Image (tube, rainbow, N blue to C red):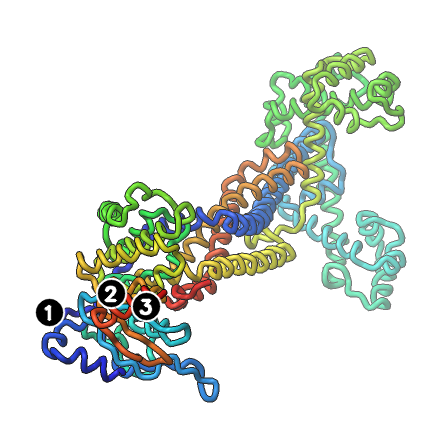
């Protein structure tokens, strides 16, 4: 199936080569050693194209989270290479990795991971502070982002004073504040109810469409299939298959009809 | 199209780190306040130790200075009226008190060269006397019986007695006084008689001078019942200083106002003492509600000190008992002075061997301080570790957002240092108050005389504060390192 994905992306080889933003080659990750070794990933080749919205789906324990940590430059692979914007992540120093995480990748977490003691605005401005943006500038941009996610009125609220959906929207504002190329969303709707989950997905789609940000989103939420461009299925540490949404939309529709 | 992603991340200024540490801490007030409390206790302990030992030392020193001054005043009053005893004169000659030596030379009527020879003889006599006092009691009894140094030296002038003495020395296996037999013989035959002559000349001269001074007093002031010396300074007669100078007294240390105050105080005190055991006894016993046998000047003064109402009643009682010129205000002052003097005596008397190392803190106390700091360090390190532990997600998230290891490290160190400063300042205030309170309990108002040590005790307090901050920062190094090394992956973990 992995080969199928490969042929798929190499169908228009030259153009695709230009637009690839994340590429993994023979990615392996092993935890433990010897008999007790667990292979979380065993040879993942994947290509993510600039500007696309890709959903990563798979059952728990499939290696999905490990894959996420790898492409987010949060963890180093046991074997294989990760190229982000054609740069091999393994070659980067700690300071360069911090730069990468700060400016190139935005992270959205299942449990929002807002900093409890900061207001919504302060949470949004933290990464800008790390990027060296002046406080006034950061405030102005932070307010604009909060307006964008529809929380301009609540800028002074702390996370505990907000609902889950609101917190996640603050987290999304935070993730895009340094205008990253890539947005990694790890189960962004898992802790949300149906309605707010839908709002969050709409917001992600809007960001993808209007800002051209590449979004990689792991999920169990089948609604995501409606907003993404491609779906990568991971099973047992391997890419099972990669499908275009156009190919499966009907099937999903039929499933839903039957349900 | 292809753009290099790898660039160095911005390093945040310390001011920004400080600000973030502060806002982080303000949200975890409970944990922070525990850490602060631990630090405050340690710093309070240390600063109290240091400040108290500084206060203690300064108070004792100023107390002994005050006592020396009082002693000097007493000595001047005493010596203005009566001649020194021969032993005092010999000690003075052998000693190095320039004032006294000047007086003795005048009264001895010797030339400087002769006077120098006499001083040498006095030195030999002192060594002879030292031999006597340092010989063990049994041997001393055999050698000298119960003679004192002067009598012994006189007796040994007899050659037969000297021969027997030397035999005895030999049999005890002792060396002759003054180093050798020849020296001893020279001392006995030449120095001793010369010294004796000089001492009696000085005593005579001194007595003459004292008589000349008391002649300045009119008959009625001199009275009959009390020593003229006290009267001499209670109301100094005109021309007293000049007369004293003419009589050979070295008046360079005579301050008539201080002497008069001293003499008047002594007179009032004596009057009160007499009244307590005499005419006023029953009335005082009733007023103080104590048996008359238990009354003493200290008890009465303690009752009066700092209580004007008591002073008024007691002075009325004393006046009825015939003590004149002692109104309530004066009595209160006298009581205050008397209690002060008592405290001075006590403080100066208890003057421990003062170590100059480290604010004069004793070795035992240094150990206590070290131990308390160790315990406190462990406490702070533990609190910081817990603070790191409960912030795993926050730290990891920050690292995902681009925080550098150094930033996280500095963040935690700052947090500890801020807590250190707050705890330290609280501890410093507590410790300072404690030291002052303890000083007051121990020395009372005498503490005021230690104001010279204010600067030093302030330094001691600041040293304690600095150590507290350092301790907090040091014990936070380990936990901060743990936090800094945390993997950003922890942010993905769901708990």
Task: Give how far apart the Cα atoms at labels 2 and 3 are.
Answer: 18 Å
Q: Are marks 1 and 3 in contact (CB under 8 Å)?
A: no
Q: Considering only vertical position in the picture, is A111 above or below A76?
A: above
Q: Earlier in the sequence, mark 2 or mark 3?
A: 2
Judge whether residue B112 can be spotted in this image: no
Q: Are marks 2 and 3 in contact (CB under 8 Å)?
A: no
Q: Considering only vertical position in the picture, is B374 above or below B349?
A: below
Judge whether residue B120 can be spotted in this image: yes
Task: Give how far apart the Cα atoms at labels 2 and 1 are.
Answer: 25 Å
Residue placed under numbered mark 3 in the picture: A255
Nearer-the-camera pick, B399 or A50: A50
Q: Which mark is residue B1?
A: 1
The quarter of the displayed image where residue B429 is located: top right
Do marks 2 and 1 share a subunit? no
Residue placed under numbered mark 2 in the picture: A228
Q: Residue at x 88, y 59 (%)?
A: B138
Q: Considering only vertical position in the picture, is B441 above or below B225?
A: below
């Amino acid at each position: 199936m992995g080969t199928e994905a490969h042929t798929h992306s190499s169908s228009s080889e030259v153009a695709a080569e230009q637009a690839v933003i994340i590429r993994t080659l023979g990615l392996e990750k092993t935890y433990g050693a010897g008999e007790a070794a667990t292979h979380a990933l065993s040879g993942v080749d994947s290509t993510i194209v600039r500007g696309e919205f890709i959903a990563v789906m798979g059952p728990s324990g499939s290696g999905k989270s490990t894959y996420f940590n790898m492409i987010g430059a949060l963890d180093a692979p046991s074997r294989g290479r990760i190229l982000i914007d054609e740069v091999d992540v393994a070659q980067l120093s700690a300071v360069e990795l911090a730069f990468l995480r700060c400016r190139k990748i935005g992270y959205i977490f299942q449990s929002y991971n807002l900093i409890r003691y900061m207001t919504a605005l302060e949470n949004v401005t933290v990464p800008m502070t790390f990027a060296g943006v002046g406080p006034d500038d950061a405030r102005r941009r932070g307010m604009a982002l909060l307006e964008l996610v529809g929380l301009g009125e609540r800028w002074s609220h702390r996370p505990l004073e907000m609902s889950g959906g609101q917190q996640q929207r603050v987290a999304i504002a935070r993730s895009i504040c340094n205008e990253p190329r890539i947005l990694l969303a790890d189960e962004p709707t898992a802790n949300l109810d149906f309605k707010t989950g839908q709002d969050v997905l709409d917001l992600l789609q809007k960001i993808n469409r209007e800002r051209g940000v590449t979004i990689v989103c792991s999920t169990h939420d089948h609604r995501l299939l409606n907003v993404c461009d491609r779906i990568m299925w991971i099973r047992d540490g391997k890419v099972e298959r990669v499908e275009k949404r156009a190919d499966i939309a009907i099937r999903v529709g039929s499933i839903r009809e039957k349900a | 199209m292809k753009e290099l992603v790898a660039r160095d991340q911005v390093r945040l200024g310390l001011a920004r780190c400080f600000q973030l540490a502060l806002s982080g801490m303000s949200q975890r007030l409970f944990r922070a306040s525990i850490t602060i409390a631990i630090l405050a206790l340690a710093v309070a302990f240390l600063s109290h130790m240091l400040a108290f030992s500084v206060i203690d030392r300064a108070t004792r020193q100023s107390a002994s200075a005050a006592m020396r001054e009082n002693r000097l005043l007493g000595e001047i009053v005493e010596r203005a009226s009566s001649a020194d005893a021969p032993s005092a004169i010999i000690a003075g000659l052998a000693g190095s008190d320039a004032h006294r030596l000047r007086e003795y030379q005048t009264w001895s009527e010797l030339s400087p060269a002769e006077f120098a020879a006499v001083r040498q003889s006095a030195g030999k006599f002192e060594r002879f006397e030292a031999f006597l006092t340092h010989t063990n009691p049994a041997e001393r009894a055999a050698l000298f019986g119960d003679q004192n140094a002067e009598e012994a030296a006189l007796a040994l002038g007899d050659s037969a007695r000297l021969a027997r003495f030397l035999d005895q020395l030999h049999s005890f296996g002792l060396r002759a006084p003054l180093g050798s037999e020849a020296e001893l013989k020279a001392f006995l035959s030449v120095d001793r008689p010369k010294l004796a002559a000089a001492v009696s000349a000085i005593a005579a001269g001194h007595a003459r001078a004292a008589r000349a001074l008391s002649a300045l007093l009119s008959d009625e002031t001199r009275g009959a019942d009390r020593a003229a010396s006290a009267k001499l300074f209670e109301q100094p007669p005109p021309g007293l200083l000049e007369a004293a100078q003419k009589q050979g007294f070295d008046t360079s240390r005579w301050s008539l106002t201080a002497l008069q105050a001293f003499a008047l105080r002594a007179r009032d005190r004596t009057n009160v003492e007499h009244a307590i055991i005499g005419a006023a006894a029953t009335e005082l016993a009733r007023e103080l509600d104590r048996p008359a046998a238990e009354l003493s000047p200290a008890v009465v003064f303690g009752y009066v000190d700092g209580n004007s109402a008591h002073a008024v009643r007691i002075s009325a009682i004393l006046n009825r008992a015939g003590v004149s010129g002692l109104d309530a205000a004066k009595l209160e002052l006298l009581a205050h002075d008397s209690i002060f003097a008592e405290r001075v005596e006590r403080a100066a008397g208890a003057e421990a061997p003062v170590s100059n190392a480290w604010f004069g803190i004793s070795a035992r106390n240094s150990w206590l301080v070290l131990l308390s700091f160790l315990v406190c360090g462990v406490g702070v390190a533990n609190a910081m570790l817990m603070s790191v532990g409960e912030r795993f997600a926050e730290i990891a998230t920050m690292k995902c957002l681009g925080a550098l290891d150094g930033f996280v490290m500095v963040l935690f160190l700052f947090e500890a240092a801020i807590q250190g400063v707050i705890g330290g300042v609280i501890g410093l205030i507590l410790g300072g108050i404690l030291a002052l309170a303890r000083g007051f309990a121990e020395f009372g108002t005498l503490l005021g005389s230690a104001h010279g040590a204010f600067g030093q005790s302030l330094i001691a307090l600041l040293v304690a504060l600095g150590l507290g901050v350092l301790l907090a920062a040091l014990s936070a190094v380990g936990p901060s390192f743990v936090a800094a090394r945390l993997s950003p992956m922890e942010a993905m973990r769901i708990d």
